[in-house]
Amino acid sequence: MKNVLLAAAAVLALGAPAFAQENVRIATEGAYAPWNFLNDAGEPAGFEIDLGNAICEKAGLTCEWILNDWDSMIPNMLAGNYDMLMAGMSITEERQQTIDFTQNYFPPDPSKFVAAPGANFDFANLQGARIGVQSGTIQAAYAEANLAEGNTIVSFATADQNMADLMAGNIDTILADGAYLEPIVTAANGAIEFVGEDVLIGGGVGAGLRKEDTELKAKLDEAITALKADGTVDKLIGQWFEGQGPFFTE
Amino acid sequence: MFDDIAFWVSYLTNGKHLTWYASFQFTIIAALLGGALAVIFGLTGATLKNSRFWPLRMIGTVYSAIVRGVPDVLFFLFFPLAFEQGVEWFVASQVCTPEMIAAQSAPWPPCKEANWFLGTPEYLILASVSLGLVYGAFATNVIHGAMRSVPAGQLEAARAYGMSESQVLWRVHIRQMWVYALPGLSNVWMLIIKATSLLSLLQIADIVLWADRLGAPNFLPTVGLVHDDWRWRYYLVLFVFYILVTWLSERAFDAITRRVGRGILSEAHG
């Protein structure tokens, strides 16, 4: 017991300088290209990293990127490990019960199914399919609510693992964000294709914040509005998502 | 051919891979620090278990019984979180004023000023302490058993020479105990090494996390080299690393056993 207290004192002494932090820490997953990923240098890169840096510059904040698994993204923000998250997270009512979002910086994006060519699904009455989703996503919630009966929902920790299992034939189809799937389907050269109808869920992608950080939210919203108006957001969307946009300027 | 080699060399030495190689330090630090703490906790636990004062004896027994039974993954998740909140609770009781508490709308911590940001160094220390606590419980049992294995005649002889109780303990009892404890402790050390693969659970960007990230399939040329699911290749590297560490550890333990057994007991060399 004494040792625990000693260890506690040691850790406290070492960790103490970390209490006072002025800059804003932004968490991202780093495994959701082109939204956010780790580039060859091993650093976070992608649409949200460029946009996040632009927002911070506009709002006059010093920002630092932190990697965190998708699964524990919201709990760890509530626990104070970082101040906001930009991780391709859709704004939903369910999430808004625990956290706040800025206005969206990517408009509502239809979710889509992909499968190997020649797969013949009767989407009106889907039965016996193995459907891959990333756990904790809006698609996972949608699939559990609407497709669980008669089908098998397979959850993956990252979107890439989900895709790898489709390529390996372990699952029949994937339901995921259209903007995530689009470049992969293009790059796959016919190895996978879109199937079925689009599913409209989610209120666009925004940055997540703790509910009490209203001051930060106001600053960020103001910066996003300005960046939408001056075309920066559309420019970045065009740069990272081929053929998408412009959404926020004429 | 040369182009191929040049390509792979540059791919395997890009920043992403260099970060992965650097992350081996976290695993090694956690193992060494965790191991050292396990021995300290083990010695403390064994001393408590041997104590003549029953409440202390109870603490030692309860510690080794309970902590040994809890799965290490669970303890690994539980201890750092509980500790962080404990520290925040303590800090909150010191710094939070009623106004600050009123301004806080989140359920935890009580006021924003009491929040403790945990980065990799803090998590690494907490992870090492967790490892030390969990495997210290095993070490407690090993050391407790080893203490009882030291022949009573050795201790009686030491007392007959006029040594004080603490001299008997440190110069004879603990000194000879190592011979009996080392085989068991080498086992505990192996378990600690294996448990270091859990570091990524605490969001430490360790070798397992990077192997996952580097091996994950990539479909987009803008992101980097396009490749299939290569995780098994990276896991294989970790596999080789852990075998290498095991082999080195065995050599080291053999050497230490020979060293501590020098001139003590012939049966210890068997």
Image (tube, coloured by chain):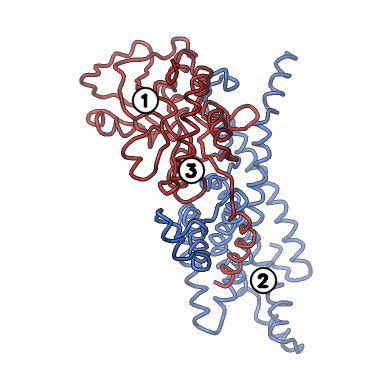
**Vertical side of B22 occupied by B153: above or below:** below
The N terminus of chain B sits in image quarter:
top right
**Residue, disc 3:** A216
Tell me the red chain: A
**Residue, disc 2:** B177
Q: Verify CB contact (< 8 Å) between mark 2 and mark 1.
A: no
Closer-to-camera residue (B115/A219):
A219
Of badges 3 and 1, the one in the foreground is 3
Q: The disc labelled 3 sits on which kind of residue?
A: Leu
| Picture mark count | 3
| Colour seen for chain B | blue
**Residue, disc 1:** A108
Q: Residue furthest left?
A: A125
Secondary element at image label 1: loop
Q: Residue at x 49, y 81 (%)?
A: B55
Secondary element at image label 3: helix
Q: What is the C-alpha distance between the residues marked 2 and 1?
A: 68 Å
Which chain does tag 2 point to? Answer: B
